[in-house]
Image (spheres, rainbow, N blue to C red):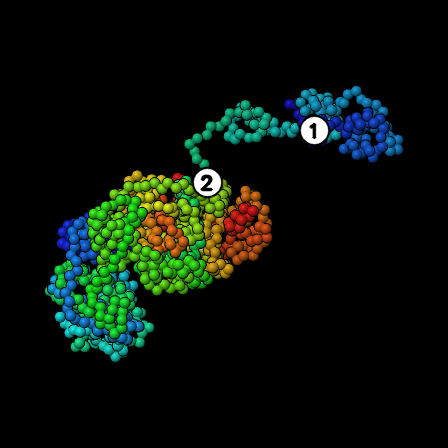
Amino acid sequence: MSIMYRLTKEGKECLNHGLPETQLIRLLEIKKAMHMDEAKQAVKDFSIAVQWAKKKNFIEMKGSQISLLSMPKTFSEEDALRNVNHDEHVPDNMISLLLQRKLIEEIRDDVRAKAEKHVGREVATLSPELIGTGVWRDVKFKEYNIKAIGVKTYPGKKQPYAAFLDWVKQKMVGLGFEEMTGPIVETEFWNMDALYMPQHHAARDIHDAYFLKEPKYAKDIDKNILSAVKQAHEKGIEESRGWEYQYNVKRAHKLILRTQGTVLSAKTLASRPNIPGKYFSISRCFRYDVVDAKHLPDFYQLEGIVIDKGLNFRHLIGLLKMFAKEVANAEKIKIMPSYFPFTEPSCQLMANHSQFGWLELGGAGLFRKEMTEPLGIKEPVIAWGLGIDRLFMLSVGINDIRQLFSHDLNYLRSAKVLY
Amino acid sequence: MPTIEVSLKTFGKLAGKTMTEKDLEIVKGEIEAVDKNRAKIEIGDTNRPDLWSVEGIVRAIKAYNGKKPGQLRVKNSGKKIIVDKKLAEIRPFIAGFIAKFVQVDEDLLLDLIQLQDKLAENYGKKRKKISVGIYNHDRIKFPVHYKAVDPSQAQFIPLEFEKPVTLKEVLEEHPKGKEYGYILHDHKLFPLFIDSKEEVLSFPPIINSNYIGKVEPGSQNLFIEVTGTDHKAVLLATNIFALALQDRGAKIESVVSSYPWKTKYGTNVSAPYIFNEKISFDRSRIKDALGIELNDKEIKSLMEKMLYGAKITGSKIIAAIPDYRNDVMHLNDVIEDIAIAYGYENFTDMDITSSTTGSLKERTLFSEKLRRIMIGAGFQELLSNILTSKKILCNQMMYDEDIIEIDNAMSENYSAVRNWLIPIMLQALQRNMHNEYPQKIFEFGECVVRNEQSNDYTKTVNRIGGAISDINIGYEQISSIVDALFSSLEISYELQPMDHNSFIKGRCAKIIIDSKFAGIAGEIHPQVLNNFGIEKAVVVFELDADLLYQVVKK
């Protein structure tokens, strides 16, 4: 088995630019003679160049002057380097010389030897040696049980409900809705009063809220909006007598955890929204409830509004039908009377589920004038909310709402990627 | 929302038909359960106490089906309630009426007590705003007196007691006194309702007397009284009760309350009270709100189906509001009733033609980037409750911070708002000790922290955190993830040593961006692992996603 060689880094450089002594005499061929300092600048490995050029009798040195004695007819080292590079034969004495000058190196033969050990045999692993030496042609590959699945892989995945919420957000954007977001800690003012829910009315019973331990009250509320809302509660607006009770300004400042996404709609209305405008929010809401299969202490709500001149109840019905089709994939729906303190008319959306029959999908209505006018809105506003937790639970067959926020990796890792 | 029990037999007798789904739609009701002959119905409208009885439901359904229900017919009894001036600051208002020839049987008694209870508990705010008393009329010597008395002097025998006790003792000893005593605690004098023979009817709003205040089955004449702090609510409840009793066959006679001051409704106020409220609007408003054209005949018929009186002259509609309703504030309330009578199913839909551009908040888009990087790095996303406990956030982490706690927590497990994600991830790892390792999890989500500068002293912040747990794991596995996040976002950052009780000393770093604190990374202290009950090492990081967003935006 023959020994094989390859160029070193220096060898490759010499092949491209010539050996140091060659570089020197090529320079002298033009200049005939030059000062040592000048030559030092021009030739990279100057001392090596001088050493070999003198040895080969190409140059002579007088003091600091270098002059050319003769130019060789051929450059044998360079030729040899070229041959090594092309795997062609090079005489042994030249090989020794190049090895001595560290311009070439031996290719360690154990790589090939290692590969050749496998010739004619059955191999399990396709090694780099087999690939590089081409010995792979002479081996047989062991056949595997292709039905075997090795160590289980758990890819990084979105949480199933989070993936669904992402899908809903994209859907909303596609339907022309702009996203609204807001803080978790709210005042009773924005969470309820601004929605025309009277401070001491039974309607607040369904929104039993979590209150902050410390501090209990916010610093302030926009004076103009506060007084307009107070007025609407106490004495009404142009066409309404209002709730007719004494409004408690201090209570309005009370800090709570947001109970309904509608608070974001109220804030949007109060801050010069686009008209026409469509807005939506997916927000975490908090309710005072015993945690069980139907209730979580905090959960997501999908809510939104549509503002435009001339909107009426029939537009609301059109919107709900579109949601039923686009978001819930329900063809058969029913729209029924309902009650919310901040809408009139109000309705609820029922959808026919192939398995569970008629289910409540959401609630909607046109915001009461007593709510929108104090916030500075003259145009009709459609408000809607869809029960996304239930929608998701139905689509994946979950019966217990607590599973929405489950930490069980067994469930999370094995959950089907739906969105 | 109030839930009432309705005897289906009584319903059938009063309505002349069985209950249908459409009937429930009209009253915004939903059947919760049916047990033998009684149905539990949840009434959606918290503002319609007139619907919180079988009589009220039947009245609405009858009208919708075109049968005119009977108007309230009242005979003047000439009898009086005399109100004490001193009650003005305690519980000023009272109204009463007489219901004659009531056939009191078990069924009726149940219904009366239920209506009394719903009016006082729900509409009456646990008897504070109003409460209702029912008496045996024939034992009363009129006129009756509604007086303010010294609670340690006045005494009577309350229901369920055998000996007379003072009003003070009623609050201390009687179960109803204990339950509703809070209403009177701030007052020196208490209300007492007595007749001309000094016989006590009741101690409003706490308990009836055991003699006049005891109603038993049989043919009877009843006296009903409502007391409270809101005059309109008192009169409204009286009207609702009178109509319900008339529907059950009673003859109603009015009683006058005589006040020593001028109330909004006069000094001598007769109950049941005729409010005679009207609301008028232009007919074009119906089309504006509902998008449908109706002629005069249709409008009138739809309004009558919903028990309004309707008068139409030219383009002007005048709606007379029933005397038992107090929820009609705006003309749209009448228009909604017209829509319900028209039938929601009969509306055709219209498209919203305005074109708008949908969009997500830039921060939402940024959060999706962060989540994608973590998923690409092989982490399983978690979604958790935001409510948790101080025990999880502080005690088990051995790290005390000023967290946001709930004043009225339902349970210890959900009594604080999370201020960081690492404890939540540790809780998740504890719950997964039986599942395969390595476990790589992350969560992106909201936390709430203190912020004295903000209007509500708090700030909702977005955080991202990740954790790895395995038998053989170290700090570098998590710093490598942090580095991957930052290099994917082209953010330059710095790791500096940090001492933190939740982490092993010398294995915790604070993450600094532009000399701002951006987060933390490290290996969890074994004591913390013990506190959570975790048996394998955990390395974690948590970053301020809002700060990252600002840096990337720049």
The residue at the point 26 percent across, 50 percent down is: B315
**Count of marks, rendered view:** 2
Residue B477: mark in rendering: none
In the depicted structure, whether residue A235 falls above or below residue B546? below
Local SS, label 1: helix
Outermost residue toward the front? B314
Q: In the image, residue A264 lies at what x, y percent?
A: 41, 52
In the drawing, does residue B212 fall left or right of residue B379?
left
The residue at the point 51 percent across, 30 percent down is: A124
Local SS, label 2: loop
Residue A12: mark in rendering: 1
**First in sequence: mark 2 or mark 1?**
1
In the depicted structure, whether residue B245 falls above or below residue B536? below
Pick whichever, B147 or B382, lies toward us: B147
Cβ atoms under marks 2 and 1 closer than 8 Å? no
Task: State whether residue A372 appears in this view.
Answer: yes
Which amino acid lies under the numbered mark 2 shown in the image of this protein? Pro
Q: Residues within 10 Å of mark 1 (few under 14, many from 20)?
A: some
Q: Quadrant of the N terminus of chain B?
A: bottom left
Specify the quadrant of the image occupied by residue A396.
Answer: top left
Q: In the image, residue A228 lies at what x, y percent?
A: 39, 59
Q: Which residue is mark 2?
A: A155
Pick whichever, B191 or A19, lies toward us: B191
Q: In the image, residue B62 lies at what x, y percent?
A: 17, 52
Q: CA distance from mark 2 to mark 1?
A: 46 Å
Specify the quadrant of the image occupied by residue A230.
Answer: bottom left
The residue at the point 42 percent across, 53 percent down is: A270
Pick whichever, A91 or B426, lies toward us: B426
Pick whichever, A119 or B99, lies toward us: B99
